[in-house]
Amino acid sequence: MPNDARREKPTGPHEAAMLVALRAEHRHIAAVMALLSQQLNAIERGDLVDTHVLYEIMDYMVTWPDRFHHPREDLIYDHVAEIDHGMAGEVRELERDHDRMAREGREVLYVIERWRAGELSGREVVDKGRAYVKRAHEHMNLEEEEVFPLIDSVLTRSDWRDLEAEDSLNPAADPVFGRRVQREFRHLARKVRRSLRHGVEQGAVIEWVGIEALLESWEVMTMAWQGGATITGDHLRSSLREAVYIALDRPLQAPLLCAANNARLTLSWLEELSQLTRDTASDLARVNRERKDRMRLLKRAGAPR
């Protein structure tokens, strides 16, 4: 039970915003785990596998959930244990589970790297990967069905305000599901979107390879447009903000300094757009190669094209 009987009542019927955010992150992780399962099934069947996306999946898991999602949960759990000592044991077990998942995630990534180098069999990747997926789902189910409701029943509005004041609990930008997809995870972001789309379409229609490639190419272009818009917006805001600082700090020299600063920002903007253009061209070529590979498989299998 909480230590202070005079504590205010918990937050009420609506779940705290931090828990809502953590549940949303769980949905993102579940989408990545679904894609990982698809890739593992393809390895087991001997189908074509995008080994780079398989690597990106586990690189994402050890880069973002293990470094930002789980530590934020741990901080909340620690706060709960300080208030309700009866939960201390459960909190320690949850935190140990986070540590185990981080360790196992790095192990799966290592196995994938060795498999890509031809040093391990696909069977080892499948077994290790499926065990990781199983643990991830079991852990998230435990948190969502038991832990989060219990936390929400213990913490008060004041507790949540204290937690919200913690800088370390501010959510970090998700490199796949965030406002701006990080370059090193762009293939994963595209495949996750495609996988989610398949979840709706599967069982309703037979995949048409040409249409699918067209849709994925459209996805590439859409992400490029969104990325370009974000880059442009960021640079415009930086230009305006820095112009204000210059005008306030050195008003007499402001016109020349602002012009020089704008030239610098413009060059940076053009460099980022140029990189985005190159990445987009590379991604479109990759989609086309995948389409051709799948068409060749269909042809060998005697399927109609």
Image: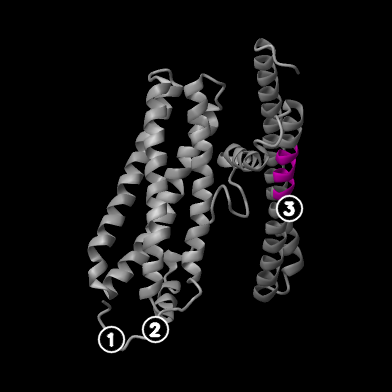
Element on which disc 1 rests: loop
Dot 2, crowdedness within 10 Å: few (<14), some or many (≥20)? few
Element on which disc 2 rests: loop
From the viewer's side, name the closer residue of 28 and 265.
28
Applied colour scheme: one colour
Q: Pick out the residue farthest to the bottom.
A: 6
Residue 171 pos. (x, y %): 49, 61
The quadrant holding residue 289 is top right
Region rendered in magenta? 218-226
Q: Pick out the residue farthest to the front.
A: 203
Reading the chain from its start, which is encountered first: label 3 or label 2?
2
Per the rendering, the mark at residue 229 is 3
Element on which disc 3 rests: helix
From the viewer's side, name the closer residue of 274 and 7.
7
Residue 116 pos. (x, y %): 46, 23
Q: Amino acid at mark 1?
A: Ala
Dot 3, crowdedness within 10 Å: few (<14), some or many (≥20)? some
Q: CA distance from mark 1 to mark 2?
A: 10 Å
From the viewer's side, name the closer residue of 11 and 175.
11
Res 190 seen here: yes
Q: Is residue 221 magenta?
A: yes
Per the rendering, the mark at residue 5 is 1
Residue 282 pos. (x, y %): 68, 31
* Nearer to us: label 1 or label 3: 1
Q: Is residue 283 above or below residue 185?
A: above
The quadrant holding residue 111 is top left
Q: Is residue 35 magenta?
A: no
* Nearer to us: label 3 or label 2: 2
Q: Which residue is mark 2?
A: 9
Residue 99 pos. (x, y %): 31, 49
